[in-house]
């Protein structure tokens, strides 16, 4: 994954974000791997992966909601 990011990464934008294309085995696998990065990553596509990420994060918000 690191090599893919290095070879496709854009220059950082004004907020410090970098866009890159990474290969994935499956939506489920990619979701698990990318969730490890927490708020330091935003999936912009494909839509299926973005929706999967949102579903997991939504469930976590329900579990860990207001304390």
Image (cartoon, helix red, strand yellow):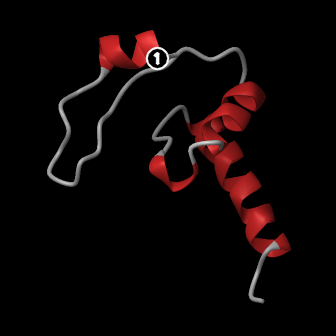
Q: Residue furthest bottom?
A: 67
Residue at 34%, 16% (x, y): give it. 6
In the displayed structure, does residue 61 sit left or right of residue 12? right
- Residue beneath label 1, please? 2
Q: Secondary structure at mark 1?
A: helix
Q: Looking at this rendering, what residue extends furthest in the right direction?
A: 63
Picture quarter containing residue 37?
Answer: top right
* Direction from residue 36 to residue 32 in the image, left or right: right
Is 44 above or below relative to 26? below
Query: What residue sits 72% from the left and 20% below the top?
Result: 26
Name the quadrant of the C terminus: bottom right
> Percent position (x, y) of residue 15?
22, 54
Between 36 and 44, the residue placed more toward the observer is: 36
The percent position of residue 29, horizontal first and vertical second, equals: 74, 26
Work out whether 24 lies above or below 51. Answer: above
Residue found at x 29% / y 23%? 9
Q: Residue furthest left?
A: 14
Quadrant for residue 66, please give it. Answer: bottom right
Query: Label 1: few (<14), some or many (≥20) within 10 Å?
Result: few
Position of residue 43 in the picture relative to residue 20 (left or right): right
Q: Is residue 7 above or below residue 52?
A: above
- Residue at (73%, 36%) from the top-left corner? 32
Question: x, y (%) of residue 33?
Answer: 67, 32
Q: How many marks?
A: 1
Q: Residue 20 versus residue 6: which sits nearer the camera?
A: 6
Name the spot of residue 24 as percent of width and height, x first.
62, 17
């Amino acid at each position: 994954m690191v090599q893919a990011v290095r070879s496709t990464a854009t220059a950082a934008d004004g907020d410090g974000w970098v866009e890159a294309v990474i290969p994935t085995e499956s939506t489920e696998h990619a979701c698990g791997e990318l969730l490890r990065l927490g708020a330091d990553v935003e999936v912009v596509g494909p839509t299926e992966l973005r929706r999967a990420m949102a579903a997991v994060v939504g469930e976590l918000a329900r579990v860990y909601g207001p304390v």
